[in-house]
């Protein structure tokens, strides 16, 4: 199995270190800064072999140059974003495969938050590293793409196996959950999830990872077919993408 180390950095970002004990290979996902990664590598005695990037925002790529300089690792990112991500060695596209030892990840294109956003799905390990496309009880803002693009991207992820563990790049769960409750106040799964989230944050613990089963039950952006969600955003009986766009519009204006 892959060993996963979750590093909280900046205000609410997560960097992930993935280590394959058999091969000794280690990957960092979306290193916003270098120092915590280097400290963890030193602590565990690991050598960084590659960096996997989901998208070009500065809080996902800020540590690349320093890490590459110190470790000579390979940097992997979307081919479409190579012009705005530093030191990329390999540009990847939809359905390309990235490997950490014998652990293989499928690249899935998920435009919407940004035009070139990608995620990494380790099918055999049941892991999804989804950057800012999907959050616990939420999804990314539309900075470069359209509501239709992000909705289509989320449908790809929603179709993965229920037990898939969801590793997103931000600790947004409390705000997302409070918003979700305004749409579905009677959703028992959502209520239970929020009680757990609040307890975790009170104790300084992360709420990531989630599972896809939990997200299907509690995340309004995956629940466009819910009558309560449709009613709350005044889109009863409307096409799913229109419901999604309305939810995203409301969330953009929500003060948690």
Image (cartoon, rainbow, N blue to C red):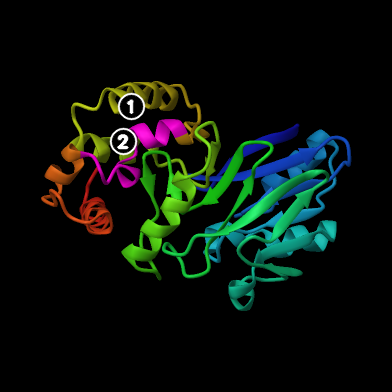
Q: Are marks 1 and 2 in contact (CB under 8 Å)?
A: yes
Report the residue that reaches farthest toward the right.
23
Q: Does residue 118 appear anywhere in the picture?
A: yes
Say which of 231 and 138 sits in front: 231
Label 2: few (<14), some or many (≥20) within 10 Å?
A: many
Residue situated in front as seen by the camera: 42 or 22: 22
Assign a secondary structure to mark 1: helix
- Where's residue 13, x and y in %? 52, 47
Q: Which mark is residue 177?
A: 2
Q: Around disc 1, counting alpha carbons within 10 Å, would you say few (fewer than 14), some (14 to 19), or many (20 or more)?
A: many
Q: CA distance from mark 1 to mark 2?
A: 6 Å
Image point (60%, 63%), residue name: 94
In the picture of the structure, the residue carrying the numbered disc 1 is 194
Q: Does the segment drawn in magenta span residue 215?
A: yes
50 relative to 154 in the view: left or right: right
Q: Quadrant of the C terminus?
A: top left
Which one is earlier in the sequence, the residue at label 1 or at label 2?
A: 2
Q: Residue furthest bottom?
A: 83
Q: Can residue 31 be seen here?
A: no
**Residue 66 image offset from top left, x and y in percent:** 73, 61
Which of the 4 image quadrants contains residue 40?
A: top right
Q: Is residue 89 above or below residue 244?
A: below
The span shown in magenta is 213-226
Magenta: main secondary structure: helix
- Is residue 111 found left or right of 218 in the rendered image? right
**Could you say whether the residue bearing mark 2 is in a helix, strand or loop?**
helix
* Residue appearing at x 69%, y 49% in the figure: 105
Looking at the figure, which quarter contains the N terminus? top right
| Percent x, y of residue 36 | 68, 45
The quarter holding residue 79 reads: bottom right
């Amino acid at each position: 199995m892959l060993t996963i180390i979750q590093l909280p950095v900046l205000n609410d970002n997560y960097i992930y270190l993935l280590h394959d004990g058999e091969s000794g290979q280690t990957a960092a996902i979306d290193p916003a800064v270098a120092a915590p990664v280097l400290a963890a590598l030193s602590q565990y005695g690991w050598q960084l072999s590659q960096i996997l990037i989901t998208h070009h925002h500065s809080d996902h790529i800020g540590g690349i140059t320093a890490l590459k300089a110190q470790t000579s690792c390979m940097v992997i990112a979307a081919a479409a974003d190579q012009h705005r991500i530093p030191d990329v060695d390999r540009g990847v596209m939809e359905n390309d495969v990235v490997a950490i030892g014998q652990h293989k990840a499928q690249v899935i294109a998920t435009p919407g938050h940004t035009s070139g956003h990608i995620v990494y799905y380790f099918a055999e390990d049941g892991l999804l590293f989804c950057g800012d496309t999907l959050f616990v009880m939420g999804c990314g803002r539309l900075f470069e793409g359209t509501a239709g693009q992000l909705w289509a991207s989320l449908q790809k992820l929603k179709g993965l196996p229920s037990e898939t563990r969801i590793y997103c790049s931000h600790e947004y769960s409390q705000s997302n959950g409070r918003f979700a409750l305004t749409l579905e106040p009677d959703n028992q799964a959502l209520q239970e999830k929020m009680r757990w989230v609040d307890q975790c944050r009170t104790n300084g613990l992360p709420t990531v990872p989630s599972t896809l089963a939990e997200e299907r039950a509690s995340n309004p952006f995956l629940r466009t077919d819910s009558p309560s969600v449709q009613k709350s955003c005044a889109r009863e009986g409307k096409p799913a993408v229109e419901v999604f766009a309305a939810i995203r519009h409301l969330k953009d204006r929500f003060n948690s």
